Image: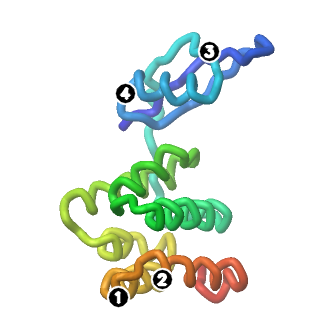
Amino acid sequence: MAIFQCRLSTEEGRILIKNYLADSPDEARKYFENLGYCVLSIKRSWKSIRFSTKKKIKDNDFIAFNQEFIALLKAGYPVHKALEAVIQRIKKVNFKELLLKVREDVKEGKSLSESFSRFEKIFSPIYPVALLAGERSGNLEESITRLSLIHISEPTRLGM
């Protein structure tokens, strides 16, 4: 993964410069073209990705991730495919990088709860436990939904 600096043009002719985390320049180009931009240039940005394990994820980002993830699981997507689909839509570099690490763990055969447990300081120790309960009961979507509802109504209760 690398950060690519993309020079874009809008339909109105405005020039924008946006950074995008992707595997290749082609992936970045496709992403912005799908959003309706004309891609003028793409170059690798040599800014380092600063992934801080002390930085919490914003409540809105966490809730949006869970809602999209649940919807894909209910639609029948396997966990790793649902993660891939949601990751493509994440704009916050730190959150995206974290989810990429989770996806890699899942691809290597680790459970979702195990993959998220290494990030307890960022989310909450409750999140991997809820995932584990869902995995063991065979109802992962319901466990995440319940946790998300608690988080929406009482975010400080979860320590997030």
Quarter of the figure with the C terminus = bottom right
> Dot 3, how many residues are within 10 Å of its Cα: few (below 14), some (14-19), or many (20+)?
some
Q: Pick out the residue farthest to the front.
A: 75
The first of marks 1 and 4 along the sequence is 4
Disc 4 vs disc 3: Cβ atoms closer than 8 Å? no
Quarter of the figure with the N terminus = top left
Q: Nearer the viewer, mark 3 or mark 2?
A: 2
Disc 1 vs disc 4: Cβ atoms closer than 8 Å? no
Query: Which residue is at a point 51% across and 73% down the rendered structure image?
Result: 123
Percent position of residue 66, x then y: 54, 66
Residue type, numbered disc 2: Ser
The first of marks 3 and 1 along the sequence is 3
The first of marks 1 and 2 along the sequence is 1
Query: Which residue is at a point 49% across and 81% down the rendered structure image?
Result: 142
> Dot 2, how many residues are within 10 Å of its Cα: few (below 14), some (14-19), or many (20+)?
many
Q: Secondary structure at mark 4?
A: loop
Disc 1 vs disc 2: Cβ atoms closer than 8 Å? yes
Residue type, numbered disc 4: Ser
Q: Which mark is residue 38?
A: 3
Q: Nearer the viewer, mark 4 or mark 3?
A: 3
Disc 3 vs disc 2: Cβ atoms closer than 8 Å? no
Q: Which residue is label 2 attached to?
A: 143
The CA span between labels 1 and 4 is 39 Å
> Dot 1, how many residues are within 10 Å of its Cα: few (below 14), some (14-19), or many (20+)?
few
Residue 52 sits above or below residue 30 on the image: below
Residue 64 sits above or below residue 88 on the image: below
The first of marks 3 and 2 along the sequence is 3
Residue type, numbered disc 1: Ser
**Residue 79: quarter of image:** bottom left
Q: Nearer the viewer, mark 1 or mark 4?
A: 1
